[in-house]
Image: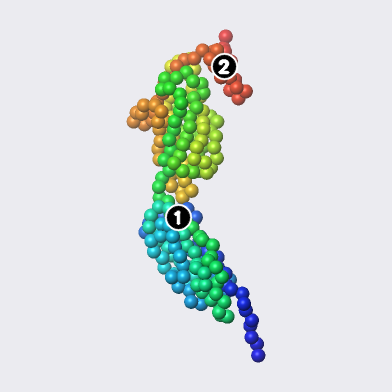
Amino acid sequence: LTVRYDVTPPSVELSSSDATQYNATASDPFEVTAQFSEEVFGLGLSNFSFGGAFSSAELAAVSRTEYTLTISPSGQGAVTVRLNDASVADAAGNANDGDSDEYAIIFDTVDPVINLTTTSASITNDYPIEVTVTASEAIYGLSEADFVVEGATVANLTGAGGDSEYEMLLLATNLATPHDITLRLASGAASDQADNPSEDPKLSRFDDDATASRLTVKAVSYTHLRAHETRGNLVCRLL
């Protein structure tokens, strides 16, 4: 006679091969896997609790230890799922003990909006010109090479992937003659965590034309430049 003694309740882990933040359409559901520590019995869709931007779900058994939830979101935001306490039992009748950890996936199809601003006037002798890059959410992949600029160069972009605010400098290329500087950020230069591309912003501090924003740089004196000299930007005068 052999009898297996078992008083250990089954445990479950919820996971997904989809990214925790994704931008599929609302009609394109994602899958969550419920992996149990042992064979369980009596599992149904009603044993799960859903929250957030949840619309509907279906449950399919892969095996007695693995089940797949196919979940459709209702709109933007996080969709949450968890297994309720005492929902299933193993062969010995031990029920799962306590709610499972809550699993969440964020549904996001909104492109990040980026604004370029400066405190410099539209006609200025500031050198360098300080520009603030502000995004409506955390963005990734932004670099100096993503900016399209005429009449200046971009320098000292600060900020890291996952930030929503960056700082940068515009260095006028002709300090002796008044000229216009135009600046914009290439469309899709950065993206949010769900890979939604950024829109095409302009330097909003200045009057816009069809393609970019514009400011006029005045000629400045050698004394003015020396006052803004740094170890990284030395000023010299040709005699």
Q: How many labels does the image show?
A: 2
Q: Is residue 187 visible?
A: no
On the image, the x and y values in percent for residue 46 come to 43, 70
Q: Quadrant location of residue 70?
A: bottom left
Which residue is at 55% across, 79% downward?
A: 93
On the image, the x and y values in percent for residue 35 come to 54, 68
Residue 147 to residue 236: above or below: below
Tell me whether the residue at label 1 lies in contact with that at label 2, contact meaning CB atoms closer than 8 angstroms. Answer: no
- The Cα–Cα distance between marks 1 and 2, rounded to whole angstroms, is 51 Å
Residue under numbered circle 1? 78
Image quarter hosting the C terminus? top right
Q: Is residue 130 visible?
A: yes
Which residue is at 41% across, 65% downward?
A: 57
In primary-sequence order, the first of circles 1 and 2 is 1
Task: Classify 10 Å Cα crowding around label 1: few (below 14), some (14-19), many (20 and above).
Answer: some
Image quarter hosting the N terminus? bottom right
Which residue is at 44% across, 41% downward?
A: 136
Indicate left or right for 67 with 1 as reference: left
Indicate left or right for 201 with 145 as reference: left
Residue 39 to residue 221: above or below: below
Q: What's the residue type where badge 1 is placed?
A: Ala
Picture colour scheme: rainbow
**Outermost residue, top side:** 239
Residue under numbered circle 2? 227
Which residue is at 49% across, 55% downward?
A: 20
On the image, the x and y values in percent for residue 84 come to 50, 68
Residue 123 to residue 158: above or below: above
Along the line of sight, the residue nearer the viewer: 53 or 155: 53
